[in-house]
Image (tube, helix red, strand yellow):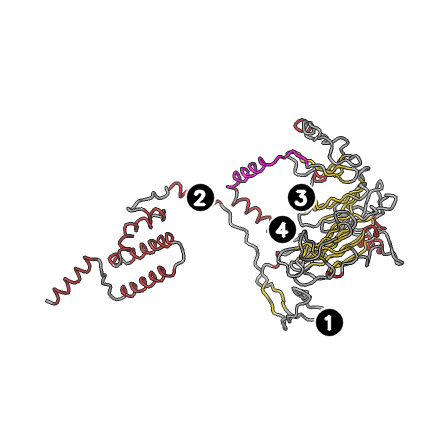
Amino acid sequence: RRERQKQHHDDESQKNGKKDRLEGSDRSQHNIIQLILNIFHRNSIIPFATMKAIFLLLSSLLISQYPGLQAWSPSFRKVHRHQHYFTTGSYNIKKAVNSPRPFATAPLANDKKMSIIEAAKKVPPPPIPFRDTSSFVLAGKLPPPETEAATPSSSPSPTPPLRQSPSSTNPLLSPPRPIPDPYGWLRDDSRTNQDVLDHLRAENEYGKQITSHLENLREELYEEMKSNIKETDYTTPVAKGKYWYYFKMQEGVSYPVYCRAPRKEGEMFHPPICEDWNANVASTNQLSSLMEGEEIYLDVPALAEDKPYLSVGTISISPNQEFLGYTLDLTGGETCQLSVKHISSGKEWVLYDVNEINVRKNIGGKVKAGVGGKDVSEPENGTDTTTTPLLECDGSVVWNDQNTAVFFVTMDEAHRPHRVYRRQVFKSDGSYVPPEQQKDELLLEERDELFNVRITKTFDGRFLIVRSSSKESSEVHYLKLSHDSESDEEGRVVENQLTCIAKRRPKVLYRATHCQGYWLIQTNYGETPNLRLMACPVGNEGNGESWQNVLLDSEDGDNLP
């Protein structure tokens, strides 16, 4: 009787779907699954539809391994009809969740699978750089130079690492620890290591091959972007002194042509534009004059001929509008060369490193000429024939009031703008100063590695602004350009003539420009969450103590007279 009752009880349980008898390891598996599902249901923060799809997928996989679970839960029984479609290789989760009945998705055809496989076989393997497991660098307190001199036969030790900031108080590791550097050989600041160049070329070629199927898409996107640009166009002429300044762009040419046209005294609006200035582009491939008396003072397309790369940094017109200073980046490394030009005659000179010239003069030798470089001893038609290296700067250039000297910024080994120089390039009569007679005068050197230096001229052209700044602090100096020609007893022109508006302070940023005898200063001074406008008289900066808030129609703060 007991056996019949037990059998009847089991039949009823299976019939009603209320219990599934799992024995041995199956029962432990059942408990684990139930625990996972309970945690997943109570603690999941993902959307319900996604959770449901993942649950169905998990359920189907469990049913395929444990068929007895189908009777344990209605959810498992419900998902049983989807079990087949999880194994077909193409299963639409969204449709499977929302569909009341099972459906089938046709698998990929064999020919399509083969085409994908063949395409994958054609993709070349990526270039793998050599891994030098024996290479390492030392980090910490390195031996003093005396130790190296005592053992001349040993290989020289690495240069001691620089701190993140000179004010850091963290001690260096002692003794130093070797740090693996298997790919350190890839660093080549000189850009001349043939192994590194070959690897970079291989990576570029690999990138082209694996993206070759996107060539049509790239061309389509390029044409779409280009269709929204008016390629043959010009900028609105801007009045400056005796001329209207503007530049023109021509379809199919990547660089602008900088032009100017005469301006009558007191003229507020530019003369009418010539209607047929672009009428002959199709036949002559050249643009006509935009305004009467047009003069091209910088033809960038002509400069870019036969050059793999060219980018214009700064274009600066001298105050008398007779000279031009401009910088060009010819490598893409954001290091520019500086050139000056006499606009009316068309003569131009590229500036060179005068320190190197002085060294050559002292040792009586010659330096191998580089880009545009020639021997100093071989003048040619009065043009600059200086030996290399060229002067390298950050791309900024400012003229002095006497139209004789330029200010520029040089960079250190880390490519950080850190020194401001002045160099006289023209005499008072307008003649060019020979390269061997040119001298660089240092105005300011920024030694804190967290700060960069930038130079600009105020809107009225009266002051040179030198700004040293980091992410959280800044300091501004200025030089009155009308005093630029005054020299002291030692012949120094502008050294020690810089005036600081306010010393750098932690968490304080500011910039300044001149207006009618006042410095207009944008700053977050006083823990201002956003920049505010302040002012102070020129010559009475007071290191920030005399700054006044510039307010309009307000009773708070100090209004300027």
Mark 1, secondary structure of its residue: helix
Which three-letter amino acid code belongs to the residue tagged 2? Glu
Image coordinates for residue 466, horizontal then vertical, percent: 74, 54
**Magenta segment boundaries in residue numbering:** 213-234
Reply yes or no: does residue 217 show up in magenta.
yes
Residue at label 2?
A: 118
Regarding residue 121, the answer to whether it shows in the image is: yes
Left or right of 4? Residue 262 is right
- Above or below: residue 166 compared with residue 270: below
Q: Which mark, residue 146?
A: 1
| Residue occupying image coordinates x 16% and y 63% | 9
Q: Which mark, residue 258?
A: none
Mark 1–mark 3 distance (CA, rounded to whole Å): 46 Å
Left or right of 160? Residue 1 is left
Res 43 → quadrant: bottom left
Residue at label 3?
A: 309
